[in-house]
């Protein structure tokens, strides 16, 4: 067996996944690797046999963690094909950052989508002609909507070549300020990494409000696995109101909001209306601990702020409602609607105030 050789590697735009094209023995394989400590793991799809295809799948190789050659019955070139020409390979990352397409010259030869690794599905390969355990046929632009996703992703990265951030920033602040007034503070929360993100601080009524700016420039991962119309849910901005009596603690909030703004891409997950997330510590002046959050599009008496669409997608403003551990468990066991009903019955709205738990 030939020594493993990396033909091409590249970090994802978010920096937390590596794309690889490797020669393992007599085969070419395309992988996405999240690192040893990442929940993303390794996702691999077959690309090409360089020698005549075997009659059967090498189950021993699979058990030993070696990628197997594609059997002849699934292979467009059962006699084998030439290795890629040096310099002909390139990646196109999907906007979400958890998926990518592999090109050889001007043709897609493999795609690892966001649902790779689920129910034994590995990915799509141009030279696969029947569904197999290590790849599915890529098909054509007419039969596979991922061709359009690749085109859209290519356009998305070209969009960033024009430095659209000032316009995005201005558009979002222009939606906030007619309702909230001018921001009193403005924080960069992207840690000098792409994409740019910020947090604006406002004073409205008796509350200090923090609003994210720029979370919506990236579509959230995995949304298409849970929502019929992903364009209605994949882009978000986040907001939280803190009552004036807790203003002394408000300086601790940007760190929590920054972590939450990165959560979907760090955890390969998504945030939406009714979702809960644990692992926070929001301010209080009593003994109640607010260690989790509930996200809501429409808390009681929330300011009505309409956000501009981004690249044809709706942008949802999700309000952060700090909750107790017991309240989060109620939402997980009985559904968020049960918790929302209890919170509304207790007069809990969009402004975080010191209170006792409703559970």
Image: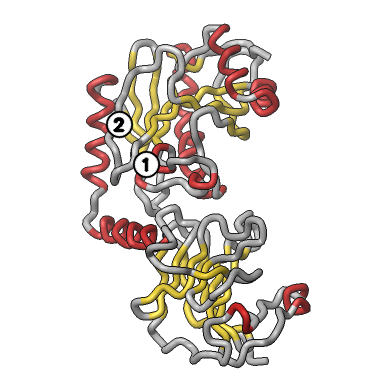
Q: Position of residue 245 (x, y in %)?
A: 47, 12
Q: Residue at x 71, y 82 (%)?
A: 56
Left or right: residue 296 compared with residue 179: right
**Hey, which quadrant is residue 45 in on the image?**
bottom right
Instruction: Find numbered disc 2 in the image and state the secondary structure of the residue it sits on.
Output: loop
How far is the residue under mark 2 from the one under mark 1? 10 Å
Color theme of the render: secondary structure
Left or right: residue 83 compared with residue 52: left
In this view, the residue in front, 37 or 294, is 294
Question: In the picture shown, does residue 323 fall above or below 313?
Answer: above
Q: Earlier in the sequence, mark 2 or mark 1?
A: 1
In this view, the residue in front, 247 or 3, is 3
Q: Residue at x 78, y 78 (%)?
A: 60
Question: In the picture shown, does residue 92 fall above or below 166?
Answer: below
Dot 2 corresponds to which residue?
307
Left or right: residue 353 compared with residue 231: right
Q: Residues within 10 Å of mark 2 (few under 14, many from 20)?
A: some
**Hey, which quadrant is residue 243 in on the image?**
top left
In this view, the residue in front, 276 or 59, is 59
Q: Residue at x 63, y 11 (%)?
A: 356
- Badges 2 and 1: C-beta atoms under 8 Å apart? yes
Q: Residues within 10 Å of mark 1 (few under 14, many from 20)?
A: many
**Hey, which quadrant is residue 305 in on the image?**
top left
Dot 1 corresponds to which residue?
216
Instruction: Find numbered disc 1 in the image and state the secondary structure of the residue it sits on.
Output: helix
């Amino acid at each position: 067996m030939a020594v493993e050789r990396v033909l091409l590697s590249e970090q994802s735009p978010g920096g937390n996944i590596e794309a690889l094209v490797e020669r393992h023995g007599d085969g070419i394989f395309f992988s996405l690797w999240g690192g040893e400590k990442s929940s993303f793991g390794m996702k691999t799809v077959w690309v090409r046999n360089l020698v005549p295809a075997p009659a059967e799948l090498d189950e021993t190789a699979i058990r030993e963690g070696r990628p197997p050659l594609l059997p002849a019955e699934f292979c467009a070139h059962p006699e084998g094909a030439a290795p890629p020409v040096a310099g002909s390979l390139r990646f196109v990352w999907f906007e979400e950052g958890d998926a990518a397409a592999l090109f050889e010259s001007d043709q897609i030869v493999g795609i690892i989508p966001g649902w790779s690794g689920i129910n034994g599905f590995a990915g799509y390969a141009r030279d696969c002609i029947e569904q197999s355990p290590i790849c599915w046929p890529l098909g054509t632009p007419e039969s596979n909507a991922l061709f359009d996703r690749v085109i859209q992703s290519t356009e998305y990265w070209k969009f960033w070549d024009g430095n659209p951030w000032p316009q995005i920033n201005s558009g979002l602040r222009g939606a906030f300020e007619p309702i909230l007034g001018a921001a009193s503070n403005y924080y960069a929360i992207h840690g000098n990494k792409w994409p740019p993100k910020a947090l604006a601080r406002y004073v409205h009524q008796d509350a200090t409000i923090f609003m994210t700016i720029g979370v919506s420039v990236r579509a959230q991962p995995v949304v298409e696995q849970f929502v019929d119309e992903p364009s209605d849910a994949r882009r978000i901005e986040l907001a939280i109101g803190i009552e004036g009596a807790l203003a002394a603690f408000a300086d601790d909030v940007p760190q929590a909001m920054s972590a939450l703004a990165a959560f979907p891409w760090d955890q390969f997950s998504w945030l939406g209306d009714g979702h809960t997330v644990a692992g926070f510590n929001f301010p209080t002046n009593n003994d109640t601990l607010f260690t989790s959050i509930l996200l809501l599009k429409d808390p009681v008496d929330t300011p009505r702020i309409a956000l501009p669409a981004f690249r044809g997608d709706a942008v949802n403003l999700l309000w952060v409602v700090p909750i107790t551990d017991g309240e989060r468990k109620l939402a997980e066991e009985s559904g968020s609607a049960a918790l929302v009903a209890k919170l509304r019955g207790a007069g809990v709205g969009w402004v975080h105030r010191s209170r006792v738990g409703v559970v």
